[in-house]
Image (cartoon, rainbow, N blue to C red):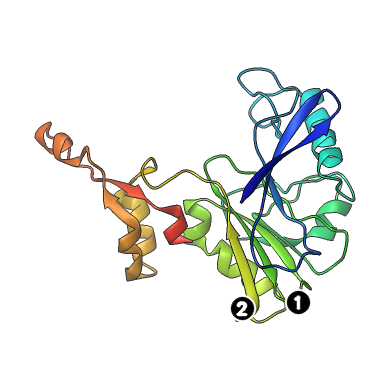
Amino acid sequence: MAAHRADSQSSRIELLEVLWPAPTRVRCFCSTRIGGTSEAPFGTLNLSTASGDSAHHVADNVNRLRDAADLPHSPCWPHQVHGALVIEAGALKRSHHALEADAIVTCAREQLCTVRTADCLPVLLCDRAATTVAAAHAGWRGLAAGVLEATIDAMPCRAEHIFAWLGPAIGPAAYQVGSDVRDAFLAHDARAHSAFAPCPSTSQSALLGQTQQRWLADLYELA
């Protein structure tokens, strides 16, 4: 992954390029918070009004991103609900409102598969022949619900021919969860235990009479 900045009007948008073995005709990138017009606390390249940002600023940021990345059309996003529903990119583009989904897939040229994340994990997928691409929004709930399995199932190619890129997300040293999260994964796959480490504050909590176990979760290993 390498960073570069693209001029867009008076600001400079920072894009993280995806370095993976996918065919070169598949273009992939991840934006950062740098280069938009949103004001604090949203600054600056905020791409969602869900947190209370100005719709005008968000629309301007989307246009700046489209121009900076030289996209074939303005990006549009699904209504992400931390589930495992996958929709086709063309259906999302044609819709007059955001369709509920946490993963996008397409086999068509000039289509965009886009997801928005903060702490959650963005996952980009592509087959070796570049006939199908997909993007998934993978927080712990989505991963436990099988969003990546559902995305791969929606791609009309053999699973062993698929490349996957795991983008920026909250790291395993910072992501604290309760035992309910750990139990949700262990119920499906006992190997998930290796993705959870006891929180360093556990012993201190025990001394204070607090019995709830806390864990540090590794989203990358879970994915």
Q: Is mark 2 in CB contact (under 8 Å) with mark 1?
A: no
How far across and how far down the image is residue 136, in percent?
63, 57
The residue lying at 74 percent from left, 46 percent from top is 77
Residue found 66% across the figure and 67% down from its top: 21
Give the label on residue 159, or none. Answer: 2
Q: Position of residue 204 (x, y in %)?
A: 15, 34
Front-most of 6 and 93?
6
For the residue marked with disc 1, what is the amino acid? Ala
- The vertical placement of 77 against 111, above or below, is above
Q: Which residue is mark 1?
A: 129
- Tell me if I can see residue 55 in this picture: no
Is 93 on the left or on the right of 222, as rendered?
Answer: right
Left or right: where does residue 109 sit relative to residue 1?
right
Of residues 103 and 127, the one drawn nearer to the viewer in this rendering: 127
Q: Residue 187: image x %, image y %? A: 35, 66
Residue type at mark 2: give it.
Answer: Ala
Mark in front: 2 vs 1 = 1
- Disc 1 is placed on an element classified as loop
Q: Earlier in the sequence, mark 2 or mark 1?
A: 1
- Where residue 62 appears, as percent x and y from the top left, is 80, 36
Could you say whether the residue bearing mark 2 is in a helix, strand or loop?
helix
